[in-house]
Image (cartoon, rainbow, N blue to C red):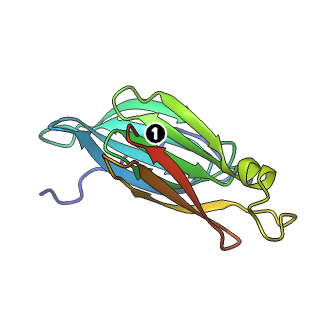
Amino acid sequence: MYCLQISLKLPPNVTASGNPPSVTGLVCTKIGNEFPTLWATDSSGQMTIWYVPSVGLEFQPAYTVKAHRGPITQLVKTWRHMITIGDDGTVKLFDMLTFVRIRTIDVMSMCLERNLFVAPNIHRRLKSASVYENYSAGGYLAVGTSYGDVVMLPLGTTV
């Protein structure tokens, strides 16, 4: 345990209004006993990752990427992947070891093409997410919209 002695700053960036971005998601994770990282997302669509030190407070920047075209609204994880959802209507999956984006799902376009929404003319944004993992039958990603829809996306057994 440490008392508050450090403040990590996101890389310099501004939102469309010219203000600094707000932090919208934080997840500390590691795979096994190795690779501890701190993932942060912000309201400008940027994602920043730091390596977490085993002792002390010397967090090392690892990776920064503009992950979404708009604000990232939530960050959730599976056993091996970090998942971001954004106001741009997309879900993006990143490998937790390499930080590489491995998949993009345009949820809003997919739902509109399949006529899954009541009142499809109302613009929706992705606002919340939850992961259910099942290693034998495959898991699901539940995504909530700003209009009250809940979209279920199958993740399979490898994500």
Rendered position, 150 above or below 102: below
Horizontal placement of 120 versus 102: left or right?
right
Q: How far across and down, in percent of the image, does residue 149 sit?
A: 66, 69
Query: Between residues 78 and 39, which one lies in front from this camera angle?
Result: 78
Residue at the extreme front of the image, as rendered: 137
Residue 16 visible (yes or no): no
Residue 127 image-quadrant placement: bottom right
Horizontal placement of 93 versus 132: left or right?
right
> What's the residue at 28%, 50% (across, down)?
6
Residue at the extreme bottom of the image, as rendered: 148
Q: How far across and down, in percent of the image, does residue 144 sit?
A: 59, 65
> What's the residue at 36%, 51% (across, down)?
27
Rendered position, 37 above or below 123: above
Residue 65 visible (yes or no): yes
Rendered position, 17 above or below 82: below
Q: Name the residue type under label 1.
A: Thr
Query: Between residues 37 and 8, which one lies in front from this camera angle?
Result: 37
Q: How far across and down, in percent of the image, does residue 4 sit?
A: 24, 59
Crowd tier of the residue under label 1, counting other residues whose Cα lies within 10 Å: few below 14, some 14–19, many 20 or above? many
Residue that carries the numbered disc 1 in the rendered image = 48
Q: How far across and down, in percent of the image, does residue 8 sit?
A: 37, 46
Q: Give the structural element (helix, strand or loop) at label 1.
A: strand
